Every structure is written in structure tokens, then in C-alpha cells.
Image (cartoon, rainbow, N blue to C red):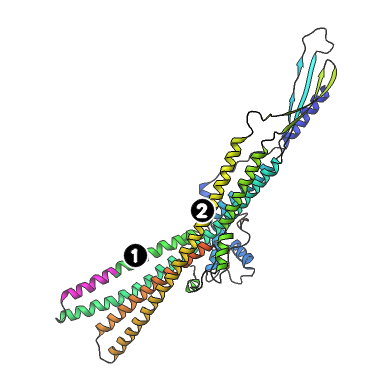
Amino acid sequence: MRHMAIFTLTVTLALFAGCASFHSRPLSPTQSAAALESRRLDNVKLKEFIETNLKCKLTTWPLRSWDFPMLTLAALYYHPDLDLARAKWRVAEAGKITAGQRPNPSLSMRPGFIGNPGMSNPLLFGIVPSIPIETAGKRGYRLARAGHLAEAASLDIATAAWQVRSRLRTGLLNLDLSRESAARLKRQMAVQEDLVQALAARLAQGEIPRPELTQAQIFLDQTRLLLQEAERQTAENRVRLAAALGLPETALRQVVISYAFLQRLPRRALSPELRRQALLSRPDILAALANYEATQSALQLEIAKQYPDLHLGPGYSFDDSENKWTFRISLTLPVLNQNQGPIAEAQARRQEAAARFTALQARVIEELDRSLAGYLETLRKLKTAETLVAAEKTQEQAAQRGFQAGESDRLALLSAHLVSNQAALARLQAFYQAQQALGLLEDAVKSPLGAYAGLPADLQTNPRHGEHRP
């Protein structure tokens, strides 16, 4: 009996020796803020990440000019939204370990003493292990459910990556629009200032009434306010662009950005193949399918729980100097319920997941149709604006020739410059509205519509592995 007790104690201590222990990892707001504010586009690790994904060597670093594909990779390298999505995926992956665990056996000991002086050995000792055996494939259903949830979390990383790309594109578009608008408004304001001076000279000679000059001054003041607003938006849009990259605003100072990607507007933007691809294989569509399959496995698990698990109990006891061996089998009798409640809940969750998937597909169809219609309309509006610009340009050239020939005065020429510049401003707005509509169409498809590459294949791996992460 003494040897059996020592053996049992030794096994127990050995089992506990393999247990995990807790290691504290406190968060430091100071270190986290310092790490975020120290991010730059000249990071050598970022260079390696770009080279890996572009499959080429960068001969110049830091880059002289950053275009949209390069900035997209920089955003995927730095943006914290991807860190969060990866963390959620790792939680789901850990759930697969939990799902695959087999239930541990239990062990109970029953020492005792018989208070009878006539007994040769009044000590009692018993060991009763209980070995659980899962039935009906429950472990397999748990593993299947955890696998589907991990797959959905992995697809959520792709959705987060696309959202990072989308916000970056919007940030670049808004910054370029505010910059170009400010440049156009400066030209317009210069023309209006010349116009006000010319009208003031005519007023001094009594050739025009004062309200005509007053109206020109009001238009000049309005343009000055519009210019100040465009400059304010430029400053804010630069900060928003930095945030879309996962960088502080200081990281974009002295950085040259190329906006060449904004010059292209495809005329045939959405083919039937792309539409079908969006409806069937967008990351969020595939994630919804994976979540539905997880509810299927959850329902199978609850159905399997109707069948009780077995508990095998081989036992040993030392009684009155005699070794006694026993064996027992126990199970829960499904008499009062057969797990109907959890089964009904799992069925309802499966129906909810199916409804969510259908609702998502309907929303995707609406996004595709709305964004395509909006894009085509903005292209028509842009064509009209370009026609007006061409017409006003012709009038401006005619006014220039008339002024040079002495057929018209400088006031008529300035008026023609002003109208032409206003038409150019309207064309600028129409062009960027078309670019915004194209971005919405890309968001509906979750795929680039053009020559620019899509997202990297490996999104699960953190490219900043080894660096300090908040």
C-alpha cells in the first residue's frame, strides 16, 4: 500500500510539472506611444517587406517617390488594424487546440481506518480512476467548428487589409484634390485681383457704376475663403493620409508622393466575371460561408451530445491486508432530456447564419449595382465638364487674339480667363468624383480595377515580427 501511495504521488507531481506558468507582460503607454511616433518610411525592414512582395531589389532607398502600390505595402506593414485582425485570428487558431483536447481522466483516493481492535490491519486504502471516453464523434465536430471559425478569422484579415488599402486610396485622392483645388483657386484669385484693379480704374474714370466693382470684390473675397478652406483641407488630409498608412504625420514630411494612378479611369470597369467573382469569393462572403459551416458543426456536436459519454473506472483497494480489484462503467442516462434545448439553439443559429449570408450577398449586389451606376454617371458628367473646358478654352484663346489685335480690352480678356478657370475647376471636381466612384466600385468588388496589383498572398504573418509592438 505504501508503494502504491508513493507511485500515485510521483505521477501526480510529474503531471503538474508539465503545466504552463504565467509570465506578466505589462503594457507601457510611454513605450507604445514612442514606438508609434518613431515609425518612418525609410525603415530597412519595410524595404525588405516591399522587396519580398514585389519580388525585386530596390536599388535606391529611401525611395525618391512613393506611388500607390508602394504606399499600399507600407500601409500593410504598419497599420494597427491588421495587427488586431491577426490577433483575433490567433485566438481562433488557439481555439482549435482547445477543441482537440481530450478530457482528462480523474483519480480519487479513499484512505480509511477500521476502529476494531481485533483487525490484523485496520488500515483501508483505495484508488478509483475514472477514464472518460467521448462518443458519437464529438471531438471531431468540435475540431471542425474551430477550424471553420479560424478560417473565417483568417479571411477577416484579408477584409481588414482591403479596408486599409481603400482608406489609403481615399486619403491620397482627397489630398490630391485639395492640393489641386488650392492651386486652381490661387490662379483664379490672381485673375480676380487683376479684374478688380481693372474695374477700379474704370470706376475712377466714371465708366462703370460702383456696384459692378463691389460685386467683383465680393467674388474675390469668396475665392480667398475657398482657398483658405482648401489649404485647411490639405493640412487635415495629410494627417488622414498618415493615419491611413499607420504613421505619424511627421513621417510624411519631405516625402514625395506620386499621384499618377489617379490619371486612369477605365471605361469598362466591371465585367460579368468580376461581378460573379465578387458575389462568390469576396473575403467577407467566404468568411460568412465559413461561419455558416461552423454553425453546421456546432449543430452536429449538439446532436452528438444526445449520446452520453462513457466513464471507465478500474479500481484498486487495500482492505484488511487484502488486495481487491474492481471495474465499473458509468454514463449519464438521457431520461429527463435528450439535449433538445441546445439542439434547438444550434438549429436557430444555423438559420441565423444562413440569413446573414443571404443578406450579405444581397448587400453586395446592391453595392455592385449602385457603385457601377454611380461610376458610369460620373464618367458622363466628366465628359460634359471636359466639353465645357474645351469650349471655354476656345473662347479664352479667341479673347487673347482679340486683345493682341486691339479688338477688345484687357477687361474682356480677364473675364475670359476667369470663366475658363472656373470651367477647369468644375472639371477638376468632376474628375475626382469619378475617381471616388471608381474607389467605391473597387470596394464593392474587393479587387483592384486596373493595372495595379492586389494584396499580398501572406497576410497572416506579421511583417514587423521582432520589432516592438504596442
The residues colored magenta run 206-222
Left or right of residue 282, residue 188 in this image: left
- Asked if residue 411 is positioned above or below residue 80 in the image, the reply reads below
Q: Residues within 10 Å of mark 1 (few under 14, many from 20)?
A: some
Q: Which residue is disc 2 drawn over?
A: 359
Residue 433: name its quadrant: bottom left
- Callout 2, which amino acid? Ala
Q: Is residue 11 above or below residue 114?
A: below
Label 2 secondary element: helix
The spot of residue 85 in percent (x, y) is 57, 52
Q: Is residue 252 left or right of residue 26?
A: left
Regarding residue 97, the answer to whether it shows in the image is: no
Q: Is residue 448 visible?
A: yes
* Residue depicted at 28% across the width and 89% down the height: 402
Residue at x 62% of width, y 54% of height? 466
Q: Secondary structure at mark 1?
A: helix
User: How would you classify the magenta stretch by its main secondary structure?
Assistant: helix
- Above or below, 188 against 349 in this view is below
Magenta includes 331? no
- Find the residue positioned furthest to the top: 117
Image position, residue 253 (x, y; %): 47, 65
Question: x and y percent of residue 11 in the render?
Answer: 77, 31
Q: Amino acid at mark 1?
A: Glu
The single residue placed furthest to the bottom in the displayed view is 405
Q: Quadrant of residue 73?
A: bottom right
Q: Quadrant of the N terminus?
A: top right
The residue carrying mark 1 is 229
Q: CA distance from mark 1 to mark 2?
A: 41 Å
Q: Report the front residue among 235 and 158.
A: 158
| Side of 396 where 251 appears, left or right | right
Q: How would you rate the neighbour count of disc 2 (Cα within 10 Å): few for under 14, some for 14-19, many for 20 or more?
A: few
Disc tally is 2
